[in-house]
Image: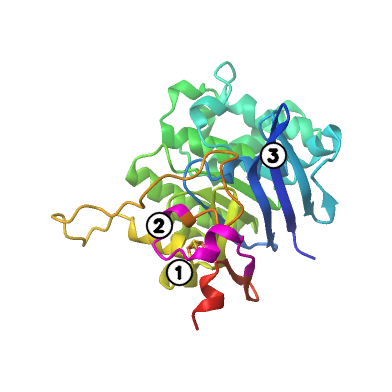
Amino acid sequence: MSLLDVRGLCLTLDRGHASHTIVDDLSFTLDRGESLAVVGESGSGKTQAALALLGLQAPALRARGSARFEGFELIGAAAAALRRVRGARIGFVFQDPATSLNPYLTVGAQIAEMLELHQGATRPAALAEARRLLDAVRIADAPRRLAQYPHEMSGGMRQRVMIAIALACRPQLLIADEPTTALDVTVQQQLITLLGDLRREFALALLLITHDLGVVAELCERTLVLYAGRMMETGATAHVLARPAHPYTQALLRARPRLDGDTRVPLYAIPGAPPRAGQAGGGCVFAPRCTQAMEVCVQLRPAAQGIGDARRACHLQATTP
Ligand code: SF4
């Protein structure tokens, strides 16, 4: 049994009589100790899909489908049951540590709270463990740092604190939402190395939400490419990045800045813009921007096809050998 088994996850925004689909029929699995990146542009639905696993999606969104964590159904689970899973068995690193940490509480109190809440630890025992966790996320001078407030720390350090909180109860799964986005390049690299080390140390499965293909290449064995809420392509990261099979993944990779690129040539940009919520037609959602679109693409939604874990949703598969 997979650690996490997501099948047909849909998120819809109901407005009056209209219902807009934000995430459409998303399916993937994640085994123990495995890492999967969900990649997509801003607005592709990746963050809301991850939040929905813990019942934390935006209040206006309705979740359907199934997401089983160690056999336990997360979608539609009672709030009390989800609270027991959140933090204790699934850790979540939110996108922006500056707004996710409580500015009124010391870092020590915020880490200790997790252990008191989920494990019934006493405050002294929880603070002792918090100190060990700061060591684990490579924050030096842990006793002094525990007494500090978030505003007294740098962005990189606050992100490490977020990771320490997420790991406090030794979860089996860590969901990290754009954990390096707000950081400068040097700190970004340190954090990528740290996440890799912690995965091995804590035997963690990692679900990484990101738009950064460089981070994906360094951290994740498998990749799922999401566009306008739909899965475009999934497979082994090495394969998806080296030989992308879907026109959208190919365009994403082409739009990546390269250090060895010719600076006189303008950077490639995918023409057009993603559809707004509710504007995707009945065919392929990428068709208006796809340079290889055919007539069938605007009429018929391509089904995900492939062998084993390598799948893509594209009509080209049926027409090109
Ligand atoms: Fe392009 Fe058609 Fe494939 Fe969509 S289904 S990505 S429009 S070729």
Please report the residue visible at 73 percent of the width from the left and 55 percent of the height from the top.
6
Q: How many marks?
A: 3
When the figure is inspected, residue 104 is found, relative to residue 296, above or below; the finding is above
Binning the other alpha carbons within 10 Å of mark 2 as few (below 14), some (14 to 19) or many (20 upward) gives: many
Q: Residue furthest left?
A: 264
- Which mark's residue is nearer the viewer, 3 or 2? 3
Q: Is residue 119 shown left or right of residue 210? A: right
User: Where does the image place residue 310, in percent across and percent down from the top left?
Assistant: 59, 72
User: For the N terminus, which image quadrant?
Assistant: bottom right
Q: Is residue 313 visible?
A: yes
Mark positioned earlier in the residue sequence (2 or 1): 1
Label ID, residue 12:
3
Q: Is residue 222 visible?
A: no
- Judging from the image, what secondary structure is the residue with disc 3 in? strand
- Which mark's residue is nearer the viewer, 3 or 1? 3
Range covered by the magenta-colored residues: 288-304
Tag 3: residue type? Answer: Thr
Q: Is residue 20 shown left or right of residue 5? A: left
Mark positioned earlier in the residue sequence (3 or 1): 3
User: Where does the image place residue 88, in percent across and percent down from the top left?
Assistant: 75, 42
Gap between marks 2 and 1, in whole Å? 10 Å
Decide which of 198, 91 is in the foreground and name it.
91
Please report the residue visible at 28 percent of the width from the left and 55 percent of the height from the top.
268
Label ID, residue 244:
1
- Judging from the image, what secondary structure is the residue with disc 2 in? helix
Tag 2: residue type? Answer: Leu
Please report the residue visible at 43 percent of the width from the left and 51 percent of the height from the top.
212
Gap between marks 3 and 2, in whole Å? 26 Å
What residue is shown with label 2? 252
User: Where does the image place residue 35, in percent across and percent down from the top left?
Assistant: 59, 60
Q: Is residue 25 shown left or right of residue 68? A: left
